[in-house]
Image: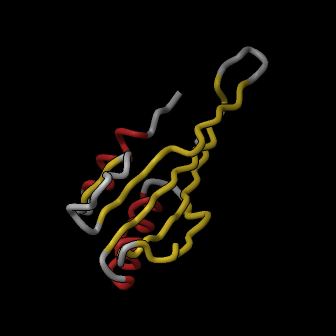
Amino acid sequence: MYLPKTDLFNSLKTLNYFVSQTQPPVFNDLPAIIFSVGNNAVSTDLDGEITSQDIEIKIDIWAEDSVTASTVLSQVEELMRSNLYIMSFSNDVPNVSNLYHIVSRFAKQI
């Protein structure tokens, strides 16, 4: 079974932004990319061997302005596509404390 967390963290860090699996109580470094594995379901054959995995990654982008958040999303989408993930969802979230937040999801089947 493939566990994507380490590969995702290392790939996202190449964008040179703050990256974490957990959201900090206070954002000291913006823009910030917070990610989590939303799904990592396996399919098996009759012998119990894994034949495929459906992986969904949730990525939240936090920034001080909308333009920066959108720019980071574009960079994340390109990076994820190069790793064979397809963006399946993206949405702006209403402002919280003058921070801009975009939530997105990426899917991949292996």
| Quadrant of res 33 | bottom left
In this rendering, position of residue 56 left or right of residue 101:
right
| Quadrant of res 86 | bottom right
Q: Is residue 106 above or below residue 8?
A: below
Q: Is residue 76 above or below residue 94?
A: above
Q: Residue furthest top?
A: 47
The residue at the point 64 percent across, 25 percent down is 50
| Quadrant of res 106 | bottom right
Indicate the colouring scheme: secondary structure
Q: Residue furthest right?
A: 46
Count of numbered marks: 0
User: Residue 35 or 86: which is nearer the viewer?
Assistant: 35
Q: Is residue 102 above or below residue 106?
A: below
Q: Is residue 41 above or below residue 67?
A: above
Q: Residue furthest bottom?
A: 67
The residue at the point 32 percent across, 49 percent down is 20
Residue 81 position in % (x across, y down):
47, 62
User: Residue 26 or 72: which is nearer the viewer?
Assistant: 26
The residue at the point 20 percent across, 61 percent down is 28
In this rendering, position of residue 95 left or right of residue 46:
left
Which of the image's four quarters has the C terminus?
top right
Residue 29 position in % (x across, y down):
21, 63
Residue 58 position in % (x across, y down):
51, 54
Q: Residue furthest front?
A: 97
Residue 97 position in % (x across, y down):
37, 73
The residue at the point 52 percent across, 51 percent down is 57
User: Residue 59 or 48: which is nearer the viewer?
Assistant: 59
In this rendering, position of residue 31 left or right of residue 73:
left
